[in-house]
Image: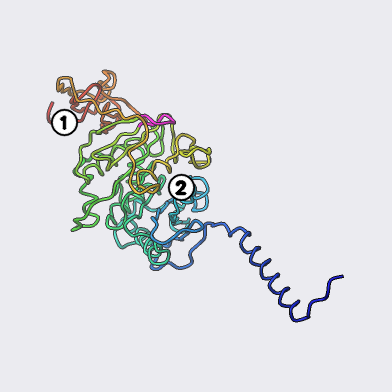
Amino acid sequence: MAASLPAGLLRILLTLSLGLVGAATATTSPARAASLVQVGSFGGNPGNLTMFSYRPDGSAAGRPLVVLLHGCTQNASGYFANSGWRKYADQSGFTLVLPQTSSANNSSSCFNWFQTGDTTRGQGEAASIRAMVAYAVSTYGTDPARVYVSGLSAGGAMSAVMLATYPDVFAGGSIGAGLAYRCAASLTQASTCQYGPVSKTPQQWGDLVRGAYSGYSGPYPRVAIWQGLSDYTVVPANATQLRDQWTNVRGVSQSPTSTRSLTGGTSLKVYGSDVVRVYEITGMGHGLPVDPGGAADQCGNAAAYFLDTICSAYHDAQFFGLTGGTTPPPTGTPTPTPTPTVPQTCVRASNYAHTTAGRAYQSGGYTYANGSNDAMGLWNTLVTHGLKQTGPNHWVLADGQC
């Protein structure tokens, strides 16, 4: 039998042994997983919104921030669970902030993108969202030069509001099934915008953005626009109006510099030096594009208003430069936009005659020029327009020229 140890030495050995066990337990036990949390107080809140945030485990200061704005009848937790953005936040360590509205603000829990009191710099819901960004910068150490916003439907329209009213805050944004800034200034006008085109020139659309922060002389954000071509809630004319608005603001042509075919029946048009993108998805209705799966470019969950086509969060994260040090070029096979090789034919006719002749098409009772998607108004024999051909099957509005 071994000799017994002195009581004092035994106590020391037992203490060291228990300490080592405790240290081993602390080392091997998993860290508590990050989750979406509500922020009780984030500063001024004139828009009566609720703030939720998500910071991946191990997220460091100096990382980007993406603000996500849900659609009508949705909430922050559902958008967080289904949109696909959590996957890329976890991979790259950036923070998500999800503002949430309620039926107290709007009967359908929509952001009030059409009310001037909520869409003016320093006022209402726009000011509340701005306060959430300021809170994230000061509390989480978010990089103020890399703040982005993305949203769906009313949230997409509110994304356009934030890009217009706070171009000094947001470096870029994504507008899913949304509407141009100040397309509407009342509920009645909102319905007009949703279901049909509004007659404004690109200059007029751009002036609305420039007027949102008069005197601003800095750079405007880069913008991605997502639109289902079978969307009858926010019709495709709205994507065209958004394109006109933001290409004009950025000082680039309304004709794309390149087009690409992507998965899910998606066509991507790039404008200028990749400062504006328009994604059009054949056969997709009203919702945010997701693509459930485990591949690098797959994300999200199919649900109401989350439609299984293509992972928009993946492409937006790439566009914003969140997955690396620089913004990579768009994925897909590029096809340069063809240089017009046809005579500059100019034809004036009724909208019905333009469609039957193949110069335009109709969707939801409204008419759009082939190629440019310029809005032409109601599809009938009474409304007339001039169309000029600028390329193969590419026509633009030319009222006053023919």
Quadrant containing the C terminus is top left
Quadrant containing the N terminus is bottom right
User: Where residue 145 sits in the image (x, y, percent)?
Assistant: 31, 57
Is disc 2 surrounded by few (<14), some (14 to 19) or many (20+) residues within 10 Å? Answer: some
Is 273 positioned to the left or the right of 279 in the image? left
Is 172 positioned to the left or the right of 231 in the image? left
| Residue designated by label 1 | 399
Above/below status of 272 relative to 43: above
User: Where residue 68 sits in the image (x, y, percent)?
Assistant: 42, 51
User: Where residue 44 sits in the image (x, y, percent)?
Assistant: 38, 68
Is 34 positioned to the left or the right of 240 in the image? right
**How many numbered marks appear?**
2
Counting residues from the start of the chain, the first of labels 1 and 2 encountered is 2
The amino acid type, in three-letter code, at marker 2 is Tyr
User: Is residue 380 a member of the stretch shown in magenta?
Assistant: no
The amino acid type, in three-letter code, at marker 1 is Asp
| Residue designated by label 2 | 88
Q: SS of the residue at dot 1?
A: loop
**Which residues fall within the magenta stretch?**
261-267
Residues under labels 1 and 2: Cα distance? Answer: 46 Å
User: Where residue 121 sits in the image (x, y, percent)?
Assistant: 29, 59
